[in-house]
Amino acid sequence: MDSALIAAVRRFNRTVTQRVGALDDEYMAQGRPLGQARLLWEIGPAGAEVAALRARLGLDSGYLSRLLRTLENDGLIAVGPVDQTGADGRVRVATLTEAGRTQWADLDQRSDDLAASILEPLTEHRRERLVTAMAEVERLLIGSMVVIEPCPPSDPRARACLRAYARDIARRFDDGFDPALSNPVHDEALVPPNGVLLLATLNSEPIGCGAVKLHPDAPAEIKRVWVADTVRGLGVGRRLLGELERYAAERGATAVRLDTNRNLTEAIALYRATGYREIEAYNTERYAHHWFEKRLGH
């Protein structure tokens, strides 16, 4: 990694933490540090499940429990089972008390005031530049938070992604999509040593997937690459593709290939931009119009 890039990120982090007051013992003069204030904000008037808060904020369970206990002891929140009958005590939810709602509203106003204080010294043109740059930084940071790792195809998160994949292409294909008419991809083909399914998650929520099938005497085959609309444009598809290629190369594959439908124009553009070349049909996939192959370096 380029040391100049690392130094630039560190300078940016220092500037941001100082400007937003993250170092203050009493964030925005509310009498509590940033961690507690942020958690109070995330709980919000609608309340939130504790597990969802942990995933959303990326907090250690022990640290989150301590933060919740502090807010609860201060009379700002109540934590209890989501089902008040106690039928499922494992699912806990945090809700604001009346005092908590008052402090949340004060935090909301102070947050507006802080944002205004950042923008106020700037000219209109520079305000627009700053907000545009912030939006780009936010998207890039979100992209860097995506985690890609192997996942059994039977996992509920993987199943959810594969169902979303089928719904997505059914909307886009000229004649819809019927899995029964497509060449099957069985679960056993997507587990080692036959292949792998990779799951992309953001804050522990599944937002993409991709798979590769390994063939002893033929190129590996990439299947079921899908990315949720909410994270399109963040490079997740390219990362999934690269990880699938790396997985295949590390297991001896010298090439990967895939088929795709003519309506998946973004996917076709990605394949061409990442070194795939169009080849003759290598299968009888009903929904395919293009077939691609890429040589893998070792």
Image (cartoon, rainbow, N blue to C red):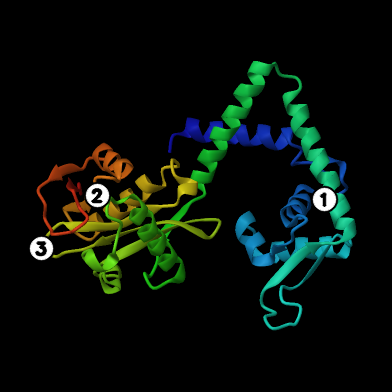
Which amino acid, mark 2?
Asn
**Mark whose residue sits in front, 3 or 2:** 2
The kind of secondary structure element at disc 1 is helix
Q: Mark 2 highlights which residue? A: 261
Amino acid on which the number 3 mark rests in the picture? Asp
Task: Give the distance between the C-alpha atoms of the residues marked 3 and 1, in whole angstroms.
Answer: 62 Å
Asked if residue 4 is positioned above or below residue 83 in the image, the reply reads: above
Residue 184 shows in the view: no
Camera-nearest residue between 228 and 216: 228
Q: Tell me the residue that label 1 is attached to.
A: 104
Residue 122: where, in percent of width, then height? Answer: 71, 19
| Percent coordinates x, y for residue 270 in the rendering | 30, 41
Residue visible at 21% across and 65% down? 183
Label 2, secondary structure: give it: loop
In the image, is 152 to the left or to the right of 27?
left
Q: Of marks 3 and 2, which one's residue comes earlier in the chain?
A: 3
Q: Nearer the viewer, residue 280 or 142?
A: 280
- Tell me the quarter of the picture where residue 184 sits: bottom left
The Cα–Cα distance between marks 3 and 2, rounded to whole angstroms, is: 26 Å
Q: What is the three-letter code of the residue carrying label 1? A: Trp
In this view of the protein, can residue 5 be seen by the observer?
A: yes
Mark linked to residue 267: none
Front residue of 24/80: it is 80
Q: Position of residue 17 (x, y in %)?
A: 70, 38
Q: Which of disc 1 and disc 2 is earlier in sequence?
A: 1
Tag shown at residue 217: 3
Which structural element holds mark 3?
Answer: loop
Tell me which residue sits at (78%, 63%) in the image.
Answer: 95
Q: Position of residue 112 (x, y in %)?
A: 78, 36
Of labels 3 and 1, earlier in sequence is: 1
